[in-house]
Amino acid sequence: MNPHDINTPRTLPAEAPEPAAGNATVPIWLMLALGALFYWGELSLDSGAGGFNKLVYSPYFSEREVKMANPQPKLDPLYEKGQGTFMLYCAACHQNDGMGSSTQAPPLVGSDWVLHETPDRIIRLVLLGLQGPVKVSGKEYNFTTAMPPWKDVLNDEQIAAVLTFIRQNRDWNHNASSVKPEKVAEIRKAEAGRAESWTAEQLLKIP
Amino acid sequence: MSVSSPANLNAAGRPGAVPAAVASPDAVHNALPAEAVDKSCRWAVWPLAVAALGWLFLGLLMQGVASFRLVAPDILSDSAVLTYGRLRPAAVELLIYGFGLQACVATAFWILARLGRTQFQGTAPAIAGWVLWNSGVAIGLAGILAGSGSGYEALQFPKYAGLLLLAGFGFWGVAAFLTFSARREPALYPSQWFIIAGFLWFAWIYATAQCLIFWMPARGVMQVVAGQWYLHNLKFLCFSAFGLAAAFYFIPKATGRPLYSAALAKFAFWTLAFFGAGGGFAASLPLPRWMPAVSSVCNFLLLTAAVAVALNFLKTVAGVGGAVAGNLSLRWFRLAVSAWLLAVLAEFLLSRPVIGEYFRFTWVTTAADVLILAGFVILGQLGAFYYMMPRLAQKDWPCQVSPKANFWVSSAGILIIMASYIGAGIAQGRSWINADTLFLESVTASKTWLAVSAAGWLLFAIGQIPMFANLFFMARQELRGCCCCCADFEAGKPTEVRS
Amino acid sequence: MNHGPLIFLGALVTMAISWCGLIFTPQLQLGRMEQAPMKLLAPAYPAGRPGIAAQGREVYRALGCAECHTQQVRPSGDNTDLERGWGLRRTVARDFLTDSPVLVGRLRVGPDLANIAIREPKQFAVPWQYKTQSNHVEELELWHYAHLYNPRAVSPGSIMPAYRYLFEERTPSPKRPPSLDALPPEITARLTGVKNGAFEIVPRREARALVAYLMSLRADAPLFEAPVQITADAKVPNAASATNAPAANASGTNAPATNVPATPAPISK
């Protein structure tokens, strides 16, 4: 038939029957390759997936790296000193880990008193002690023994150091402002006339 | 028509072990002959195919105009409708939804009916789906050009259009299910696995994307997650499934031999199902690193699926004689499958840290998209249409030169487009890797390449004209046939029985 | 593989795994993310964009700007985004928390825009310089208007389309006195060559909104997941220049200052 005739209908060419699928097997090297790639894939995810953590973005590989890359605040020089003072004088009641004890002292970790914006209350507290019930971070505490005054035992620098320590302790996730010895001196002078220890109610009146 | 059945020949074309599936196709329990199957598919498949071709032409033209506007931005700059930022998304949506999925479904319908040796069931839902789908595409196109494009690649249609598309696809799924259930050949051929999966996967991913971006918008970057997941799965699950289904059907059909291995096809199916669904997240996206890591691993593992597919087809066509090798269907699919294999490789390379970040945001990523969308989907479906449409019409193409012209011009167009995008991308990459070079130098370096790409798109569009000419001639033959019948009837002459 | 339902089930299982792993899990991780509390000027980052900037985001979307521009800054080591001064740090999920739609883009036919509001003029695609010492906010806004009206006038060689339809071009007459919102005469002269004030270019509402949006684009607040690192060769946007949350300031928005932490620690690997 004329190949350029577009007017006469053409018959269809013969066609093969519907295709069938042969029974050759999957070559063993392909299965091995799949296995090898699977293994590689697992290794790759182990090292490169950041632990499937939603906060790990490249170029960091783990949350620890991200934490390290974040700016670490400079430790106040009084911090180390304060740690020593704490262990010596405060840990007996407030414990080494700052969690307090049910019979002697409330916890310092996460305490709203410790982390208050200004350290004025806790400076007074340390100078003159505390008696009676106190509410710390929502929990009521009422100890038989009161907190003793420390104004005759610790000087300004020591008090500033220990308060800086408890306010900036990284292990407790505290990140409040440091306390200056001058501030302690100022408050010591202001409260020079007072002899009795504080109650929580009185301290709470101080901003 | 009697044809020597290749079923009794093994892959080397010699009498030997009978393939695992059906021994003699026509001995299947009351199998419907091919002509009857084709006749039953007409009303379901023709509208989809013709509409798809129409959108293809329009989409390619719009992409050509958009590419031209990219390099000559001062011409026609007073119209908001013609800005690149609206034309290009509209064109891509037409290529994906107007042509891509519609053509895939048309081919899938026909393959399901043929492989089931049964009449096509569900013509009514197929037509209902056609109406809804094409309305959605038309409305969506108008929406994008009017400024309601969503901004998400491949999801640009406004939400009302998306709903129409989803509803239309639902109807098509019903038709496919009905035809599949009515099959008379119980054994399943690989094409059918891929088609079942393709229908399920598209419905799921499209519904998810529509939900999380339009109807119940997810917070912040989750929208990007949904969009990227959808885009990757569209290419490497849905289009891959439908396209491979067509390849698995047409390549053995064209050579007259059985597919080399059902087991390899099974291997390809499951590796595609698992690993094709894991990718999509580039390392540059603002996402935690585990997501690009998972994508990278999945893209690597997807290579095994590519190897399985390549091996299967290479062995199927091995040693095929000259006349068969020149068969046009084989030509279309050889190119389409090669494009798919390259696209899988490209996706893998682009997810590697060094290569990926060198080419990230360059035109090379667009080239990879063109590879799978145009090289695999468009060429593959056109190849399927060239085989399928004459059989639906029960007559061969009137002009025998046009299919070849279509093939060569389209292939040339795609090659030019890909080469120019790769060239532009390399020029950008070389410019950016040095932090001291000005950004504008990368624009200048890539401009000529982009101009060439515009020519490539226009060439690709022109390459479809032979197909329309052929369709026109075929329609004219059909009408003349009807007219002859009517004229004879009125004149009282005995009317010829039309074959 | 001869049972349709089994294949369907298998395909469903694999898709379900993908959906659970890559849609559901990210939704649990990212979809309910909250703003990060900051000890800076604004209490939470990111704050939502002010009204006109949110409208500008819609204009950005409708014009298809995301086809050519990205808003993603890559970390150091992945190409040269940071070295080019396109940001102080990489962009992360939280930066896009208050945006909808999130238009991060995928192609850089034009430069990245994630930090365009704080980018130094010498880091633009075509570098330029501020003319005044103090009026940087207004200068940057005018640059954006000029760029939208005719990109090639301020950026020779650019292929960005000219968005002239975002502007109203008018000749002042006794019936229509000169508009207060018109671009200054020297800029009009540069864009159109018309010097004598016989022609003025007035940005329409869409142009204003778009420029407000562009002036709100910054992603430099230090976050836990993306601390700001200053290396020796990074081009740091000059914090002293007054491009800190420009007009947006008046509406009381975010604008965490571009302050850099006092002692950035090096990355230890």
Image (cartoon, grey):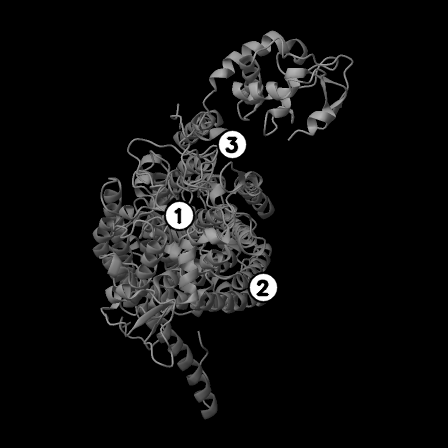
Report the front residue among B421 and B129.
B421
Which kind of residue does numbered mark 3 sit on?
Answer: Asn
Q: Do the residues at pointers 3 and 2 share their chain?
A: no
The crowding category of the residue bearing disc 1, from other C-alpha atoms within 10 Å (few below 14, some 14 to 19, many at least 20), is: many
Q: Chain of mark 1?
A: C
Which kind of residue does numbered mark 1 sit on?
Answer: Gln
Q: Is residue B319 above or below residue C197?
A: above
Mark 1, mark 3: which one is toward the viewer? 1
Where's residue B246, x and y in %?
A: 43, 53
Residue B122 is tagged as 2
The crowding category of the residue bearing disc 3, from other C-alpha atoms within 10 Å (few below 14, some 14 to 19, many at least 20), is: some
Q: CA distance from mark 2 to mark 1?
A: 47 Å
Q: Chain of mark 2?
A: B
Mark 3, mark 2: which one is toward the viewer? 3
Q: Chain of mark 3?
A: A
Q: Quadrant of residue A71?
A: top left
Q: Is residue A27 above or below residue B9?
A: above
SS label for mark 2: loop
**Residue B222 seen in the current view:** yes
Q: Are marks 3 and 2 in contact (CB under 8 Å)?
A: no
Q: Which residue is mark 1?
A: C71
**Residue B107 seen in the current view:** no
- Give the residue drawn at x 53%, y 38%: C36
Find the residue positioned furthest to the bottom: B491
Total marks shown come to 3
